Image (spheres, rainbow, N blue to C red):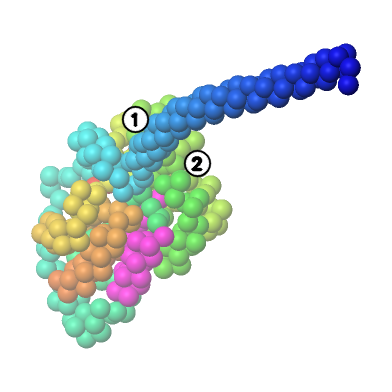
Amino acid sequence: MNIHRLKRKLRRGGRRLIRRFNKRLRRRRKHRHNSKRRELISDELRERLSYSKLFYVVYVVAVSLLCIIMSQFSPNSSFKKWYYELTHKETVNKGVAREENVKEVDANVGRFLTKYRYRKFGPTNPEEIDPNAPMIAFTFDDGPSANSTKRILAALEANYCHATFFVVGRQTEQFPEELQAILAQGSEIGNHTADHKKLTDLSEDDMRQQLEGVDKSVEKATGERTTVIRPPYGAYDERVLGLLDKPVVLWDVDSEDWDSRNAQMVLDKVLSNVKDGDIVLMHDIYDSTAEAVELLLPKLKEQGFQVVSVSEMAKYKGKELELGKAYGKIEP
């Protein structure tokens, strides 16, 4: 082997050795780079994950708060109860202007006959109204509802009684079958506005829209319109009375079922205050009210009271409900 071939061979071997060394060096650099890159990615992922956890916590808290706030606008919420109690203090509940010389009706007139019928026929005595016997009108606001209204109607049916249901628009659209059941049972449907807004704060057009919306919903479900009106919160003035096209019905006995949500307290409140000709205010959106009605009707009938709708009581007492007046109770 000559010297030139040997030199070439050494040069090729040296180049191969250098290439291998450089290749290994590049692999090591690449490995270090990838490790650093992986570490950076890992750090970035951890950082993103921490932000994601924070976002998730904030999201859960925000959604929970939103749900709590939205729940306070439901009919049974504590906020509604507080708002109703606050605005209820401003209620204008004048009722019927009493004549000074009107002869007081003896609460015992007809009581013996009514008691006799009750004892003879039980709680489902024949549906006969004795005009001389004491009678009261049960009224229910803010419904109808799915469960409570059905229970109340069943109790009225079982005791051959009627009532007046002052419905609101949002409920009439949701429960048309309950509206049909009210009329089928023989009870009466009154207008309590579409959105339970205080009429004294509304313009003439807004007031008519609030009332017309309920009438249309009731007519769509039952084929009939409402017969009487109860202004939300009992608030009215001369302007409101002049614009309404139906008699205004208020109340004389407030069961305060919206406050207590307790059947026994509602029962005691009504029994201790009710008198002949009274209009009793309740709400058919509470199960406690339905329970109270189931207990009240037999007790009231046993005491000689007849439970009727507002229009029925006016009819049997010879009183025509007039426009431009507000009736808190009905006397002969």
Identify the residue shown where x is 45% and y is 61%. 178
Where does the N terminus fall, quadrant-wise? top right
Question: At which x and y percent is residue 50?
Answer: 42, 31
Question: At which x and y percent is residue 155?
Answer: 31, 70
Question: At which x and y percent is residue 309?
Answer: 33, 60
Which amino acid does the dot numbered 1 rest on? Thr
* Front one among 63 and 99: 63
Where does the C terminus fall, quadrant-wise? bottom left
* Front one among 104 and 266: 266
Question: At which x and y percent is residue 208?
Answer: 47, 35
- Per the model, the C-alpha gap separating discs 1 and 2 is 17 Å
Q: Which mark is residue 328?
A: none
The answer to whether residue 272 is seen in the rendering is yes
Identify the residue shown where x is 32% and y is 69%. 156
Q: Is residue 285 above or below residue 185?
A: above
Looking at the image, residue 157 sits to the left or right of residue 225; the answer is left
Read off the magenta span: 146-167
* Front one among 142 and 106: 142
Dot 1 crowding, Cα within 10 Å, few <14, some 14–19, many 20+: some
* Front one among 108 and 28: 28
Dot 2 crowding, Cα within 10 Å, few <14, some 14–19, many 20+: some
Q: Which mark is residue 200?
A: 1
Q: Is 245 colored magenta in this rendering? A: no
Task: Say whether disc 1 or disc 2 marks the residue closer to the N-terminus.
Answer: 1
Q: Which mark is residue 212?
A: 2
Which amino acid does the dot numbered 2 rest on? Glu
